Image: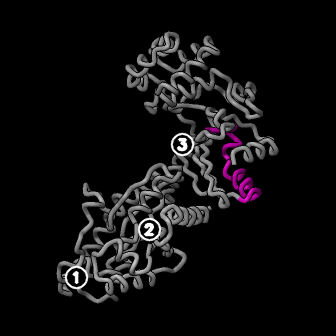
């Protein structure tokens, strides 16, 4: 998709520069990962419109826009036909810690070309990549060698820009590359981080834009919460792990079991060999438990889930409140099912539910934690939740990779519907 996008930008006469990693665009066996692409400030301010027009033309979909800084947006584009995901880190300024080291004119009047792809000149690429790797603690053998190759290619300009961005530790950086001493950088990395010049003065317009950006992030978080439901033996844990291993348009993933409460216990320790071992509570105690659930779910959502969504996290629940309606014996609920359904109105809900079921014989062959007759009832109750909009049925008889791909496609569809 990236090559189609670059052709489109050329067609629209939009100037751009791939900041780093441009060689990987032409390596078939390379994992491209995220692509850093710089635009002129005015073009960046309309980049969402540009990319939406591009997607409309090509049949692609925008599934995520993560606005991390005033002039930085992480935008994910999805190809529904191939399920390919393009991760674009778009910028309107080439800066670090609000300090701009090169003007827009300096950058776009001097761009180089690598196989018809516009790139930064060597010393600009060197400085940007160096500051990025120092800031992220990612000075590896590979990254150091790449930086040193850039340094040796334009030694004097690279030395000059290093001196402009560090307060008084530029000599250490220069010495590390001149003597091919990666350890010198590693030993000084925390000091170097603190030594990078920081610009604390933002323009009035940028301050306003930043406040609007933060407000939008809070009001319309880019993270998504989903839940997996199904009887024991339906393969929820396998599918959850498979989904987490996919390339996802999120900063991170977070796992919760049943409730939005952080616990030290893992999913294995939460499993029980006999979920129906204990007798149900009385009606009064059962209703008190439901009220406590309202408190737990809402407090946990505000404290744990909403902040995670603001930070662009995919929140994954293994089971959720709906399980109590399907399998009330597991939770020792002895009240009326209609009351439990009514209480669900006051429970915050994930964006999507994936309901994994198979025939009773298959699931019973995997786990015999409840009687087969009870298992059949649970399967029917789970299927009754399916509406094809928020609650989606997934056939757990399929191979795990097929199930993961189906879940992934449904998730991506729900995400691009937001745009």
Mark 3 vs mark 2, CA separation in Å: 27 Å
Magenta span: helix, strand or loop, mainly? helix
| Closer to viewer: mark 1 or mark 3 | 1
Classify mark 1: residues with Cα within 10 Å, few (<14), some (14-19) or many (20+).
some
Q: Nearer the viewer, residue 72 or 408?
A: 408
Q: Nearer the viewer, residue 274 or 111?
A: 274
Residue at horizontal 24 percent and vertical 61 percent from the top:
269
Which secondary structure, mark 2?
Answer: loop
Classify mark 2: residues with Cα within 10 Å, few (<14), some (14-19) or many (20+).
some
According to the picture, the residue beneath numbered tag 3 turns out to be 69
Of the two numbered discs 1 and 3 on the same chain, state the one appearing first in sequence: 3
* Quadrant of the drawing holding the C terminus: bottom right
Q: Nearer the viewer, residue 364 or 349?
A: 364
Contact (CB < 8 A) between labels 1 and 3?
no
- State which region is magenta: 36-59
Q: What is the x, y in percent for residue 254?
A: 39, 55
According to the picture, the residue beneath numbered tag 1 turns out to be 286
Magenta stretch: includes residue 224: no
Which secondary structure, mark 3?
Answer: strand
Where residue 402 is drawn, which disc sits there?
none
Give the side of residue 329 with respect to residue 55, left or right.
Answer: left
Q: What is the x, y in percent for residue 108?
A: 73, 30
Residue at horizontal 49 percent and vertical 19 percent from the top:
166
Mark 1 vs mark 2, CA separation in Å: 24 Å
Q: Could one spot residue 170 in this view of the protein?
A: no
Residue at horizontal 57 percent and vertical 55 percent from the top:
64
According to the picture, the residue beneath numbered tag 2 turns out to be 350
Residue at horizontal 77 percent and vertical 46 percent from the top:
8
């Amino acid at each position: 998709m990236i090559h189609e996008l670059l052709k489109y930008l050329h067609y629209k006469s939009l100037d751009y520069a791939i900041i780093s990693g441009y060689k990987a665009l032409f390596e078939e066996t390379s994992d491209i990962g995220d692509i850093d692409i710089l635009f002129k400030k005015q073009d960046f301010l309309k980049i969402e419109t540009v990319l939406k027009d591009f997607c409309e033309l090509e049949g692609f979909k925008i599934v995520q826009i993560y606005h991390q800084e005033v002039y930085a947006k992480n935008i994910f584009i999805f190809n529904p036909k191939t399920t390919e995901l393009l991760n674009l880190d778009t910028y309107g300024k080439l800066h670090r810690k609000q300090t701009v080291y090169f003007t827009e004119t300096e950058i776009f009047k001097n761009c180089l070309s690598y196989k018809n792809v516009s790139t930064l000149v060597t010393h600009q690429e060197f400085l940007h990549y160096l500051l990025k790797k120092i800031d992220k603690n990612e000075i590896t053998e590979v990254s150091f060698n790449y930086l040193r190759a850039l340094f040796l290619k334009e030694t004097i300009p690279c030395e000059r820009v290093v001196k402009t961005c560090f307060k008084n530790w530029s000599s250490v950086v220069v010495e590390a590359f001149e003597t091919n001493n990666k350890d010198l950088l590693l030993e000084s990395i925390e000091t170097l981080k603190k030594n990078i010049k920081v610009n604390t003065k933002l323009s009035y317009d940028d301050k306003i834009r930043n406040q609007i950006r933060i407000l939008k992030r809070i009001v319309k978080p880019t993270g998504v919460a989903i839940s997996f439901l199904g009887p024991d033996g339906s393969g929820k844990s396998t599918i959850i792990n498979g989904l987490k291993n996919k390339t996802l348009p999120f900063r991170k993933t977070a796992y919760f079991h049943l409730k939005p409460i952080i616990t030290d216990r893992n999913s294995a320790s939460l499993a029980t060999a006999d979920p129906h071992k204990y007798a149900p509570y009385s009606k009064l105690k059962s209703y008190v438990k439901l009220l406590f659930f309202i408190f737990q779910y809402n407090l946990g959502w505000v404290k744990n889930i909403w902040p995670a969504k603001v930070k662009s996290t995919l929140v994954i629940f293994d089971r959720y409140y709906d399980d109590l309606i399907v399998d009330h014996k597991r939770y020792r609920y002895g009240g009326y099912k209609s009351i439990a359904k009514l209480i669900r109105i006051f429970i915050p809900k994930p964006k999507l539910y994936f309901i994994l079921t198979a025939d009773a014989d298959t699931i019973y062959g995997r786990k015999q934690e409840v009687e087969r007759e009870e298992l059949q009832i649970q399967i029917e109750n789970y299927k009754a939740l399916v509406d094809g909009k928020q609650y989606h049925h997934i056939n757990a008889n399929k191979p795990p990779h097929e199930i993961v791909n189906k879940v992934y496609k449904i998730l991506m569809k729900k995400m691009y519907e937001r745009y």
